[in-house]
Amino acid sequence: MMKKQLIMEKALELFAIQGFGATTVQQITEYCGISKGAFYLSFKSKDELILALIDHFMIQFTSDIDQIVRNSNEDLLYKFFYATFHSFQKHSDFAKLLIKEQTQSINKELFLKVRYYDRLMDETILFMIERLYGEKINHTKFDLIYCIKGFMNTYSHLFLYMELPFDLDLLSKSLVEKTNLLAEKSSIPFITKELIDLFKQPDKGEVTKEHIGKLLEEKIEEMEDSIEKESLILLKQNLDEPNFNSAIVKGLIENIRTHSECKWISYLLMNFYKL
């Protein structure tokens, strides 16, 4: 196991018991059986480690859900809810910790990081709603985003903290029914696009062309020769000097989309090119 990965896994165990604030770098290094010097070779500070943990889990969650939303043609809403709660269940220690820290922490970087991924999830849910219901719910679709997120939040608390037997299939079917009823019957939205725009602020977590280019360079360097690597090279070239049409770009992204190491970069590219 790589040292950085070891530190993240062991630190998460301590954070789950003690919380972010009460856990020191000294405790983390002792728990990992490494020196402080070894820790600081991987992370500049405890805060950087915390943000890396959030990135690690949220990148997986966000990109996996987005792939389902973009590529599922049947039972899309069911698959969305099932995958969401399955992920919460699989990473329950981290989910509990993040929920707890969001309510107790005043760390600005933590707030901005969580807010960034929350905004990405809003975009994925909106895309799903538009695929499912089309123009007939244009006046209520932004309100429906928050209803769906409310379901996700409320029911995740139920099984994360109550530790009850949990039937993911039944829950997903139940939430599909509720969401469809809201989509079909709701006519008076509270959340509108105007309200969202009113409170929208510049997001410091916004992914830039330069950031995507840097990620592509790193991924190209890491990967062995393959179709995926060739596709990454072509995507980097097109990012620097756009020559390909949308169909070619989409095809190149499709080449890397299912590779375990390329899910996040494919997600970012799909959003960058608005495909």
Image (cartoon, rainbow, N blue to C red):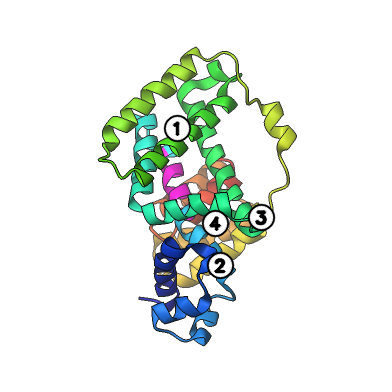
User: Distance from label 2 to label 3 (Cα)?
Assistant: 14 Å
Amino acid type shown at disc 2: Glu
Residue 62 lies within the magenta run: yes
User: Distance from label 1 to label 4 (Cα)?
Assistant: 37 Å
User: Distance from label 3 to label 4 (Cα)?
Assistant: 15 Å
Amino acid type shown at disc 3: Thr
Q: Residues within 10 Å of mark 2 (few under 14, many from 20)?
A: some
User: Distance from label 3 to label 1 (Cα)?
Assistant: 31 Å
Whether residue 62 is situated above or below residue 199 in the rendered picture: below
If you read the primary sequence from the N terminus, does the residue marked by circle 3 or circle 1 appear first? 1
- From this viewpoint, is residue 266 visible? no
Whether residue 101 is situated above or below residue 133 in the rendered picture: below
Q: Where's the N terminus, which quadrant? A: bottom left
In the picture of the structure, the residue carrying the numbered disc 4 is 235
Q: Position of residue 129 (x, y in %)?
A: 50, 28
In the picture of the structure, the residue carrying the numbered disc 1 is 151
Mark 1 or 2: in front is: 1
In the picture of the structure, the residue carrying the numbered disc 3 is 208
If you read the primary sequence from the N terminus, does the residue marked by circle 1 or circle 2 appear first? 1
Q: Position of residue 75 (x, y in %)?
A: 34, 29
Residue at x 31%, y 45% (from the top left corner): 163
**Mark 1 touching mark 4, by CB under 8 A?**
no
Q: Where's the C terminus, which quadrant? A: top right
Residue at x 57%, y 25% (from the top left corner): 143
Residue at x 42%, y 20% (from the top left corner): 180
Q: Magenta segment, which residues?
A: 59-68
Secondary structure category for the residue under label 4: helix
Residue sitting nearer the eye, 80 or 234: 80
If you read the primary sequence from the N terminus, does the residue marked by circle 2 or circle 4 appear first? 2
In the picture of the structure, the residue carrying the numbered disc 2 is 217
Mark 3 or 1: in front is: 1
